Image (cartoon, coloured by chain):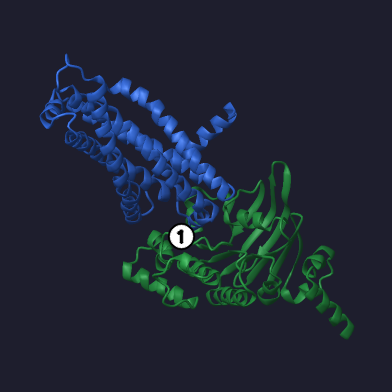
Amino acid sequence: MVSIKDGLNGLGEYVILIGKAIAVPDRWRMFWKQYVTEMFQLGYNSIGIVLIISFFIGAVICLQIKLNIQSPWMPTMVTGYTTREIMLLEFSSSIMCLILAGKVGSNIASELGTMRITQQIDALDIMGVNSANYLILPKIIGLMTIMPVLVTLSVFAGVVGAYATTFLGTTTFAELNEGFRYEFNQWFFWCGMIKAVVYAFIITTISAYKGYMVEGGSVEVGKASTSAVVTSSIYILFSDIFLTNMLT
Amino acid sequence: MIEVKELFKAFDGRLVLNNINTVFRNGEVNLIIGQSGSGKTVLMKNIVGLLTPDKGRILYDGRDFCALNKKEKIQLRREMGMIFQSAALFDSMTVLDNVMFPLNMFSDKSYNERKKRAMECLDRVDLHNVDLKYPGELSGGMQKRVAIARAIALEPKYLFCDEPNSGLDPKTSIIIDELISSITHEDNITTIVNTHDMNSVIGIGENITFIYKGCAEWKGSNKEILNADNKPLEEFIFASDILRHMKTSKKTNE
């Protein structure tokens, strides 16, 4: 079990590291280069998995509601309406970020952990480079930029997945269309965007902290990677409660 | 010149460096030698600032590293180059990008000038047509040479090498040693090499500090070391059968 002292030590180290990372870059041209690379690596490379998962989840949510919740005394647009709200309010923002915490979080922690144990971070420090700033800030800003795009794509893919169920004959295009357009509240979309940005910060900072602080060898890098995913996921779920309560 | 004065460092109450006093001279290859666990890596880490000493001073041409503020420390770090035991090349970058990295970070020169300088450094370490390769595609000796090229890109005043021959065959080790020695003399750099390779000690050790149980047990040059009257040093040097045999034969011939 983690003692209170260890917990506070960890919190202190995290705050100091993120304080070091969030500073004016030594060289802007290097920062922009890293920023674009990170957006590509963390975001662009995740588009495939986001589209696939969202498409099928959108389709399954639509089917479940149509088959198990929809009843004759409900309006026919309920299926489309509920699918849209679930995708917008919870799946595409929170659950998708939870899935991305696994992919992106382990990627960040293992990359930085490997750099630490192979002395690449020491090499940066010796050169007089603020290694935390050079390595972590582009990841934070990069994922915070690309995450809202991924969430938007996820909503889009979910809706397409729901429409795809019309080919199974359980619902019609017109019914879904009516539901998707029924009393659309634009704020719900922005709620998803705000959540995405907050979760992107949680995923990158926690995973970067776990990777940057690795001591030892490959076993410790593996442990840091696992810990990054678990801790990020817990904090995403925890903050989801507060954000949902605050925003909606 | 780098001076280490009354340096102490302990971990969890265990004294690892105990009152180290030594001088690393300019334009010479200065070696820190000692067996594994003697404290030489800790000494090197204290000198380059990766660890903070518990007590003592480290003077870079009179500038006390520990007393410098953050900005001055960063400035001083830009006068340092370091070659790590594992080469520590950035594996996501090509060889050229690795060598250009310090220039990209700290030089205001144009891209073409920076690239020209990086290519000069690669030529200097006798590496040709590898600039677009990644570190993983190179042999251990080539990686060390890229690390040297990167370390000298900004024309450092101080060069640190942490076990540069580790994992290399004897022939490649000699090439790396000769490279470090020639760069030190031609560019008048203060070079500190942390090693336990006896070939390096005999070959390039102009100013040697022997660390034993956290203390600077013996100081001298490669010319003096074989005849040094110091038991721990003798045990360290003549630990190998070949050297012990050489020593016995020499004495018999005399």
User: Looking at the image, which residue is at 20% across and 26% down?
Assistant: A187
| For residue B95, above or below residue A128 | below
Quadrant of image for the N terminus of chain B: bottom right
Q: Which residue position holds label 1?
A: B90
Q: Chain of mark 1?
A: B
Q: Residue A195, image x and y in percent?
A: 31, 31
For mark 1, does the 10 Å Cα neighbourhood hold few (<14), some (14 to 19), or many (20 or more) residues? many
Quadrant of image for the C terminus of chain B: bottom right
| For residue A91, above or below residue A118 | above
Q: Residue A73, image x and y in percent?
A: 16, 14
User: Looking at the image, which residue is at 41% across and 51% down?
Assistant: A134
| For residue B234, above or below residue A34 | below
Q: Residue furthest top?
A: A73
**Side of A2 relative to B218 (left or right):** left
Residue A62 visible in the picture: yes
Q: Residue A154, image x and y in percent?
A: 26, 38
Please identify the quarter of the rendering in which residue B4 is found: bottom right
Between residue A168 and residue A118, name the one nearer to us. A168
**Side of B171 relative to B208 (left or right):** left
Q: Residue B219, image x and y in percent?
A: 74, 66
Judged from the image, the secondary structure of the residue bearing numbered disc 1 is: loop
Q: Residue furthest front?
A: A169
Residue A193 visible in the picture: no
Query: What color is chain A drawn in?
Result: blue
Between residue A100 and residue A35, name the one nearer to us. A100
| Amino acid type, residue under disc 1 in the picture | Phe
User: Looking at the image, which residue is at 55% across and 30% down?
Assistant: A7
**Side of B112 relative to B168 (left or right):** left
As drawn, the chain in green is: B
